[in-house]
Image (cartoon, rainbow, N blue to C red):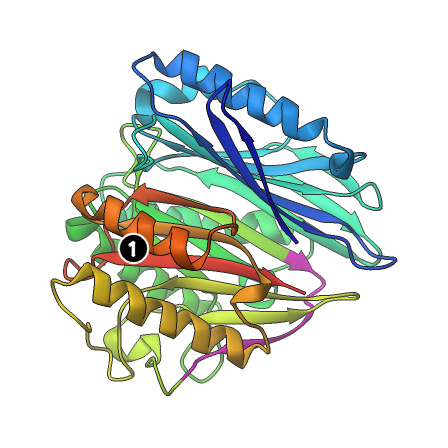
Amino acid sequence: MNYSLKNNQIGTLCRYSVLCPEGGMAEVHVMIEVEGREETFSEQYSRLQDAVFELESQSVMKGMQLVMRRFFLSDAINQTAIVDDHRPCTTSYIGQSPLDGSKIAAWYYYVGPQAEVKYMVGSTIVSYRDRRYVWTRGQLWSSETSYEQSRNLISDYETLLTTFGATMERNCIRTWFFVKDVDTQYRGLVRARRELFEQMGMNPQTHYIASTGIGGCPAEPSSLVQMDCYAIIPKPQMRYLYAPTHLNRTYEYGVTFERGVALDLDDHRVCYISGTASIDNKGQVVHVGDVRAQTHRMWENVEALLNEGNMTYDDVIQMIVYLRDPADYALVKRLYDERFPDTPRVITLAPVCRPTWLIEMEVIAEK
């Protein structure tokens, strides 16, 4: 169920989704927006913390444990040190300016008291029944090229998973790659990922991993690529989503990720839909130059993927929307307010990997 908690006094809006399967693990996804005001970043961050405190005092949050949070920042290099309050959870900082005029927005994820939550450096491990759910924060590397950095990031993550008796090929469910100057640096990520995935046994005949590759500025000035990851151990029952009537297979244009994945867990189903744009089943950009038409085609593509996972937009609990041109924000916000007024979301400035794509979105759906 989706809810909103708006506080006009402190100028914040929390949209949140609550999933409470009978006899299962409760989950809450929260997207927090801060009203843009003529004030310092510290003042805006303080108001965001007030909103989190107010949310966590609600009865629905009783016993909930913070697992992961991602901050969308207007100036990640300067702001990260101010944001870091050392809460024991996986925390990712990415330079993707919120387009509502503020300096910060956030995604918070909680699980209920039914689970055991442990934090190790860089990762949070949620243990529930016979599975472990591992969220790993923004990994960074400072070598010379995006290709080298991407190889190191992926290799380091594979090494991390081996400490849990897991691998990327078998257990990684979702990745996010944030690329500085995506128009020029994305090619290095694509090449490194393709090479390493092939070595790990992932190819067009097997599978890849649901993913978003998008523009974003890492908090470390020398980093060109940042990687966030999510894995489940042991591997759950799952199937990949393709929607061939609307989208083509990604390897046909040289990239290596899945359009989406549906997981059947003990008490519910989850769909992770990768970053999806206005594309057809031939791999061509649809409605070049028209953000309104691209938005509608993008929604249609995401809906086709959800339907393949036996879900609809009514099951979506979280959205992240990426725009190339901030001048399109007012129109896109109005479109989302009309169609998805209560769905937790954030809209950020983040160029998509092809310049002609003006908008992209990713979603999580559960039921």
* Residue 119 place in picture, x, y as percent: 68, 34
* Residue 64 place in picture, x, y as percent: 75, 37
* Residue 252 place in picture, x, y as percent: 28, 80
Quadrant placement of the N terminus: bottom right
Q: Residue furthest bottom?
A: 245
Q: Of the residues shown, which amino acid type is indicated by label 1?
A: Leu
* Residue 260 place in picture, x, y as percent: 48, 70
Which residue is more in the foreground, 125 or 50? 50
Q: Give the quarter of the image for residue 317.
A: bottom right
Part of the protein shown in magenta: 232-243
- Which residue lies under the disc numbered 1? 189
Residue appearing at x 33%, y 42% in the figure: 348
Left or right: residue 299 compared with residue 110: left
Quadrant placement of the C terminus: bottom right
Residue appearing at x 55%, y 18% in the figure: 85
Specify whether residue 88 is in view. Answer: no
Q: Is 8 one of the magenta-colored residues?
A: no
Which residue is more in the foreground, 342 or 27? 342
- Quick check: 249 above or below 186? below
